[in-house]
Amino acid sequence: MTAGGMDADPDGSEEEEKGALRTALAGLTTRGRSFLAAGIAAAVCSYVLGQADLLRVGLLLAALPLVCVAVVYRTRYRVAGSRRLSPARVPAGSEARVHLRIDNVSRLPTGLLMLQDRVPYVLGPRPRFVLDRVEPGGRREVSYRVRSDLRGRYPLGPLQLRLNDPFGMCELTRAFSAYDTLTVVPRVEPLPAVRLTGEAAGYGDGRHRSLALAGEDDVIPRGYRHGDDLRRVHWRSTARYGELMVRREEQPRRAHCTVLLDTRYSAHQGSGPDSGFEWAVSGAASAAVHLLERGYAVRLLTDTGSSVPGPDGGGGFTGSTHDSAETAGLMLDTLAVVDHSDGAGLSAAYDVLRGGGEGLLVAFFGDLDEEQATLAARMRQRSTAAVAFVLDGAAWARGVPGAGQHLLEDRLRRLREAGWTALPVAPGASLPQLWRHADTMGAATTDAGPPVVGGMTGSWS
């Protein structure tokens, strides 16, 4: 929520007063300028024709807009405005509601007000509201809806008020300084629950346990803390150190997953909400959120080598289950503004994975030439399991499935030989169906025996 105050005639220096007066004169409407011009013309005609009555009419016509300017300029009342977004983060194609509130904090009633909020054109037409007289201490609340099919961060504001006189001769626009930001994130599709290879406790647990003690002689105790269970007291260590010592609890270790998004400009063709790049962005968002909900420590990695949440802790992976919702929001905010990169290859992402790419790897690739397909195949070596969704760039560009089938099959074969569960993505493909299909393909690979690559085995099951 943002809020701000506005004075219809703030006090200031003499120069500011002159500037405000010039602004008020510039606020004459077409009607006001017409009355002023007619009055001047009538006064000139009365002088030429010698008609005193015509002079009085001209003075009346010219004085009316000037009096209205003075009234609007000298109007003294204070109003406060606020804006609230509900919600502040929405998926592409969904609506958000913007609530506006105007409070009259002065002791005088306001006149007729026109309320206007500035919004980017992609969110819809500029909303305008006419507010009747607002009593002292009163308030008015209005709302409007915004919607965008394109990801991004869109500023809303500043809020503007138009002040009019009763005759419509003069109009002044005053603006608040505060504004808000609406974040339109990629669409997140619910994915089916399939089991991932390497998870000992089954799908969704996402945690291994590393015992802090291997036996009675290898125990690593710690000092007793208030609230510790007395049944965990280790008496041998207590006797050795002369104070109460307790056994350490089993430490949970979360399973890791890396979601790789290929953002290279050369790898994606077409643009707009129905393009292949937008499908890949939505797919990466869906996979990341799905795995976070299942207890995985997830990081989002792009071809540029940048990762989210970032390299500050755990190589970019989340630290605990408590921050999963916050991490999901951070990833979605990042994907809301992700754009094509100028890079030509995947070497930066490969370096990151080579330095710490253990765990599950889910990749969304664009077009892969022979060199990049070879590099992508080598990314599999450090991963427990790897799934690749490879977009058929030619098909997405032409809107016809199978346009580049021969080249795509060669890339898929190369990835599968390296141990990837690789699936082609045609225009209009359903990610939940592909996710389930990846599980079926991985299970078949496991039954037949996983391929051996560089002395390592792996599969998706």
Image (tube, grey):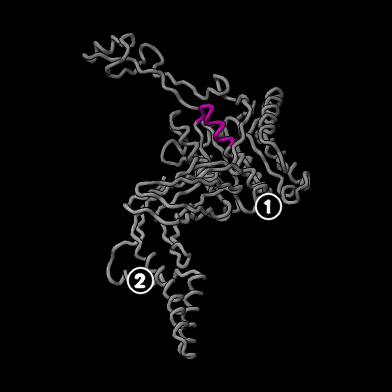
Q: Is the magenta stretch mostly helix, strand or loop?
A: helix
Q: Residue 279: percent from the left, percent from the top? A: 64, 43
Spot occupied by residue 148 in the image (x, y as percentages of width and height): 59, 48
Which picture quadrant has residue 161?
A: bottom left
Amino acid under disc 1? Gln
Residue occupied by mark 2: 19
Which mark lies nearer to you, 2 or 1? 2
Q: Judge the density around disc 1: few (<14), some (14-19), many (≥20) Cα neighbours within 10 Å.
A: some
Can the viewer see residue 377 in this picture? yes
Residue 46 circle label: none
Camera-side residue of 239 and 65: 65
Magenta range: 286-296
Mark 2 secondary-structure assignment: helix
> What residue is at 68 percent from the left and 53 percent from the top?
270
Give the position of the N terminus as an image quadrant: top left
Q: Nearer the viewer, residue 327 or 424?
A: 327
Q: Is mark 1 on a helix, strand or loop?
A: loop
In the rendered image, residue 25, in percent from the top left (x then y), is placed at 41, 72
- Residue at mark 1: 269
Amino acid under disc 2: Gly
